[in-house]
C-alpha cells in the first residue's frame, strides 16, 4: 500500500500546510490541478507490520464465522428445529427466507466496529465468542443425525 506525499518548501517544517499526504495518486492529481499545477508528490510504501495482518485476519474470521452460522442455522431449520435467538426468530418470522439480510448486516456492523479497535487481543476475544453459536449449531446437527 502506498501514500503520496507533497512538500511545500515555502512553509516551515511543522506547519500544518508543510506536508500533504494523499491516499491515491488520483486524489493527489486532483489537488494539484486546483492548488499547485507545477507540484509533484512522491510515492512511499506504508509498512504495516504483523499487528495489522493479525487484525485483518481476525476481522475476516468474523465474516467466515457469520457465514458458517448462517449455513448451520439453515441446516437446523431444514431438520425441523427452530431458532433459539429471539431476535433472529422474529426476523425469520417476519422476513421468511430473507432473514439472512439482518443477520449479515449485524455481522458487517460487528466487523466495522472491530476494525476500529486497535487492540488485537480484544478482537480475538470477540472472535472466540463468535465461535460459540457455530459450535452449538454443529452439536445440534450431529445430535440430530
Image (cartoon, grey):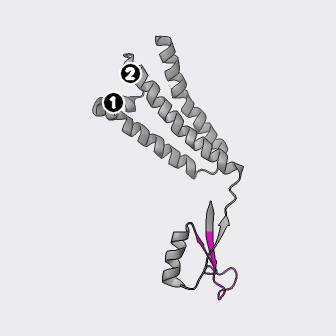
User: In whole angstroms, how far apart are the C-alphas of marks 1 and 2?
Assistant: 10 Å
The quadrant the N terminus occupies is bottom right
> Which residue does the numbered mark 2 point to in the structure image?
77
Q: Is residue 40 left or right of residue 67?
A: right
Q: Residue at x 38, y 39 (%)?
A: 102
First-in-chain label (1 vs 2): 2
Q: Is residue 117 left or right of residue 96?
A: right
Numbered range of the magenta stretch: 4-23
Give 39 or 139, whichever is nearer the viewer.
Answer: 39
Pick the residue in front: 43 or 67.
Answer: 43
Position of 49 relative to 9 (above/below): above
Q: Secondary structure at mark 2?
A: helix
Q: Secondary structure at mark 1?
A: helix
Residue at 52% across / 20% down in the picture?
138
Instruction: Please say if 20 is above or below 116.
Output: below
Q: Which residue occupies 52% across, 84% down?
A: 35
The reply to whether residue 84 is visible in this rendering is no
The residue that disc 1 covers is 92
Tell whether 117 sits left or right of 106: right
| Residue 99 lies in quadrant | top left
Amino acid at each position: 500500500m502506498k501514500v503520496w506525499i507533497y512538500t511545500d518548501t515555502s512553509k516551515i517544517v511543522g506547519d500544518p500546510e508543510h506536508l500533504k499526504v494523499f491516499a491515491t495518486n488520483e486524489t493527489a492529481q486532483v489537488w494539484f490541478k486546483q492548488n499547485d499545477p507545477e507540484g509533484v508528490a512522491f510515492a512511499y510504501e506504508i509498512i504495516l507490520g504483523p499487528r495489522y495482518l493479525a487484525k485483518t485476519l481476525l476481522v475476516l474470521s468474523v465474516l467466515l464465522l457469520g457465514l458458517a452460522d448462517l449455513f448451520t442455522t439453515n441446516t437446523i431449520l431444514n431438520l425441523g428445529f427452530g431458532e433459539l435467538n429471539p431476535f433472529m426468530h422474529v426476523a425469520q418470522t417476519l422476513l421468511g427466507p430473507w432473514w439472512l439480510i439482518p443477520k449479515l448486516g449485524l455481522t458487517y456492523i460487528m466487523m466495522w466496529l472491530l476494525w476500529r479497535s486497535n487492540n488485537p487481543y480484544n478482537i480475538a476475544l470477540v472472535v472466540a465468542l463468535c465461535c460459540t453459536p457455530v459450535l452449538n449449531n454443529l452439536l445440534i446437527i450431529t445430535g440430530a443425525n
